[in-house]
Image (cartoon, rainbow, N blue to C red):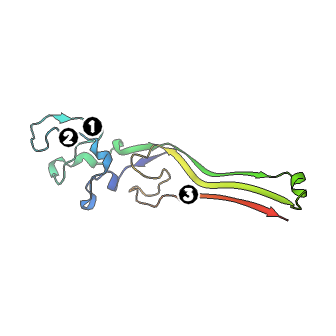
Amino acid sequence: MYSYNVNWEHRWPFQNGGNLLTYFLDRWHRENPFDLNSPWIPGKFPPLRFNDPQHNDYNKDSDWWLVNVKYIRLRTMEIGYSLPKKLLQKVNIESFRLYFNTYNLFSIDNLKTFGIDPEIVWDNGLQYPQSKFVNIGFNLTF
């Protein structure tokens, strides 16, 4: 378990003139965005004000942006079965083993909202996801 400080594209919704991430749709906003006197509709995230220097504090450093990361990952797994030697001797085979192994098959974590891997290196979340491998095979010895 560790803490992840949400930053860059995940905290600054219009970073580099970019689009709004979907989780920012659950934010405080006016009922009518063109009427400043319309009532506020509550949300999980703070209201966004694009290029408004008087109200740009929604993305300042605070513990609100700090996420305690909790995850469990199936890193490696192998399941195999070797046929009994008594059965194999009848067909002149010394050994036969079937196997299935995997690497990074899945993880259960609380960062799905941000769409990032729980073993993130950079605080901007921009990195390739970890590779997943699945191997199915057999070993046959005559």
Residue 132 has which mark?
Answer: 3
Residue drawn 39% across the image and 46% down it: 113
Q: Quadrant of the C terminus?
A: bottom right
Relative to 31, is 78 on the left or the right?
right
Residue ID at (57%, 52%):
105
Q: What amino acid type is highlighted by mark number 2? A: His
| Callout 1–callout 3 Cβ contact below 8 Å | no
Q: What crowding class fits label 3: few (fewer than 14 Cα within 10 Å), some (14-19), or many (20 or more)?
A: few
Residue at 35% across, 45% down:
65
Graded by Cα atoms within 10 Å as few (under 14), some (14 to 19) or many (20 or more), the crowding at tag 1 reads few
Q: Label 2's element?
A: strand
Percent from the top left, x then y, of residue 97? 77, 56
How far, Cα to Cα, is label 1 from label 3? 36 Å
- Whether residue 61 is visible to the viewer of this picture, yes or no, is no
Q: Could you classify mark 2 by the number of other residues whose Cα lies within 10 Å: few (under 14), some (14-19), or many (20 or more)?
A: some
Disc 3 from disc 2: Cα separation: 40 Å
Q: Which amino acid is tagged 1?
A: Gly
Q: Which residue is mark 2?
A: 29
Q: Is residue 129 above or below residue 118?
A: below
Residue 43's label in the rendered image is 1
Mark 3 or mark 1, which is nearer the start of the sequence? 1
**Which is in the foreground here, disc 3 or disc 2?**
3
The correct choice, above or below, for 3 with respect to 135 in the image is above
Q: Secondary structure at mark 1?
A: loop
